Image: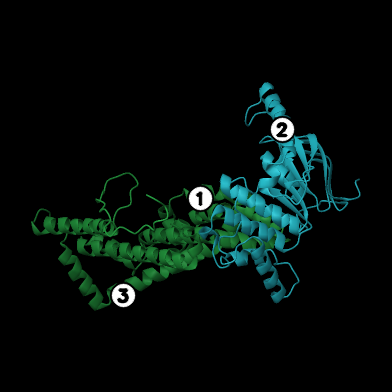
Chain colours: A green, B cyan
Amino acid sequence: MSGSVPSQRPAELRRQPVRLLELRREIPRRWYLGAGVGFIALFLIAWIALTAGQWVSPIFLPSPLAVLAELRSQAASGVLWQDLWASVYRIMVGWVLSTVLAVPIGVLMGNFRFFEGLFEPFIDLVRYMPAVAFVPLTILWLGVGDAQKFAILFIGVFFQQVLMIMDNVKTVPREMIQVSYTFGLSQWEILRSVILPAAMPGIWDTFRITVGWAWTYLVVAELVAANVGLGYRIMRAQRFLETDQIILGILIIGLLGLFTDYLFKWSYRRLFPWALQSR
Amino acid sequence: MIPSAKLQAQRVWKIFGGQQEAEVVAVQDLSLHVGVNEFVSLVGPSGCGKSTFLMMAAGLESISAGDIWIDGKPITGPGADRGMVFQSYTLFPWLSVEENIRFALKKSKLSRREQDALVREHIQLVGLEGFERAYPNQLSGGMRQRVAIARALVYKPEMLLMDEPFGALDAQTRLQMQELLLNVWQTHRTTVLFITHDVEEALLLSDRIYVMTARPGRIKAEVVVDLPRPRNLLDTESDPRFAALRRQVLTLIREEAQRAAASGEFAGAT
């Protein structure tokens, strides 16, 4: 009854029941991961059941085994590696071109009202124009080579990316900039050593999201006038009703998208540990 | 002009809007001065323009009419002669406590070793030994404001401008921080212009208090805080003179609140 007696930790603690469906409640990690893996497994089982039971014709939906066989034959013949490299190369160049321009322009727009006024109306106009519709134009302008593919990826990514970077920069609190002035820094010094580092985690997240979009624009870029690439393989397979090739292509693009997303998330945690929410 | 004044403001106006928008008079014909090594507070109802005035004194907001001088020279923009502490947390989250404080010395010509010594000295001054390598997201609100104070002092500005620096803290932490600031100021005398709406806080810390009117903000009264120094939280606040001054200042502020209410003014409207 008295506070002077040192309290001893009870040997046994009460077991808490697992409550899965309660508003905003944490759940055990194994349940969280297990549910995600389980759902994918369920999807695969449904796929196998549908195809093995002859419910649908293989022309519409080939079995997972047929897709695997396709993967093996493409890997053996080297077609897969050619396609992969061609697509990854296009994505890298297209996305890097867009990013190299979007970062400085977005940073200017986020910091100077003049640049925002200068560029935003034009960008707003262009960003709702469908990238697909630029395919004939870009072929006319740039021919059928890689430059045309870069252009489509650029059009698909740049105009959104630049606005997102502008917003990333605008989230830097005004007081953080004001206090930097009182240390005697010039506005360019503040831009470099306060605004950019403060906005960098947000910009990194924009990179992650926009590189994902680049993957989805890949098929558009390789729609016409390509003779190699993952998107091209899908378009060609459509002509010959080779659904196993189509599904394989879609899966590979999906997995590569997931992989780049993960890469950015992982590097984010490495580069900006200070920006992670402390729990 | 008052010769001994560190900061002097004469007939300062701040008017927002104009042209197409409706004009808002935030500060009206405000004159005040802060002497060398004097601690002066500006109190008033919220929205009275006291923060706007501080931003003008910092050179971060333009002056619509009138003049503010530092050491007899008119303000032309922000400068390292005036250190600032804000209510919101302005630490750089990608820098550790130590690096945040050192950041303020970016423009200093001191050697690396001298800078190290200054940083260490100021970490001790605000009682953050052992947290040198912590990052802001690992610190409590009170600790963050300690860093902000150390950072504003480390480059030895000639005066400090503080905009409700403890306004976002819980009551207990707030008292601790008031004592900390009191001790820091009593040992390292410097000129301070302090904005608050907390009357006890202003009385505990200040040599003089200016009470502002409701918007448009003017100086309503000047109160000299003739409490003996050195002060401390417990003794000073139990001094009968403290109670009398508190009553005086609260009465002035209440008059303003009532006047504002009577003139049909509500938040956001003029």
Label 1 to label 3: alpha-carbon separation: 35 Å
Relative horizontal placement of residue B269, taking residue A49 as reference (left or right): right
| Label 3 chain ID | A
Question: Which amino acid type is shown beneath numbered disc 3?
Answer: Trp
Position of residue B69 relative to residue A146, above or below, is: above
- Looking at the image, which is closer to me, B50 or A174? B50
| Label 2 chain ID | B
> Circle 3 sits in a helix, a strand or a loop, which is it?
helix
Which residue lies under the disc numbered 2? Answer: B247
Q: What is the x, y in percent for residue A233?
A: 29, 66
Question: Which amino acid type is shown beneath numbered disc 1?
Answer: Val
Label 2 to label 1: alpha-carbon separation: 64 Å
Q: Disc count in the image?
A: 3
Q: What is the x, y in percent for residue B79?
A: 76, 57
Which residue lies under the disc numbered 1? Answer: A126
Tell me, yes or no, if residue A88 can be seen here.
yes
Quadrant into which the C terminus of chain A falls: bottom left
Question: Which amino acid type is shown beneath numbered disc 2?
Answer: Arg
Relative horizontal placement of residue A277, taking residue B46 as reference (left or right): left
Question: Dot 3 surroundings within 10 Å: few (below 14), some, or many (20 or more)?
Answer: some
Residue lying at 66% horizontally and 67% vertically, measured from the top left: B102
Residue A184: quarter of image: bottom right
Q: Residue A81 carries which label?
A: 3
Q: What is the x, y in percent for residue B58?
A: 75, 50
Q: What is the x, y in percent for residue A244?
A: 20, 63
* Of marks 2 and 3, the one in the foreground: 2
> Circle 2 sits in a helix, a strand or a loop, which is it?
helix
* Of marks 2 and 1, the one in the foreground: 2
Q: Are marks 1 and 3 on the same chain?
A: yes
Residue lying at 23% horizontally and 78% vertically, measured from the top left: A76
- Looking at the image, which is closer to me, B15 or A49? B15
Q: Earlier in the sequence, mark 1 or mark 3?
A: 3
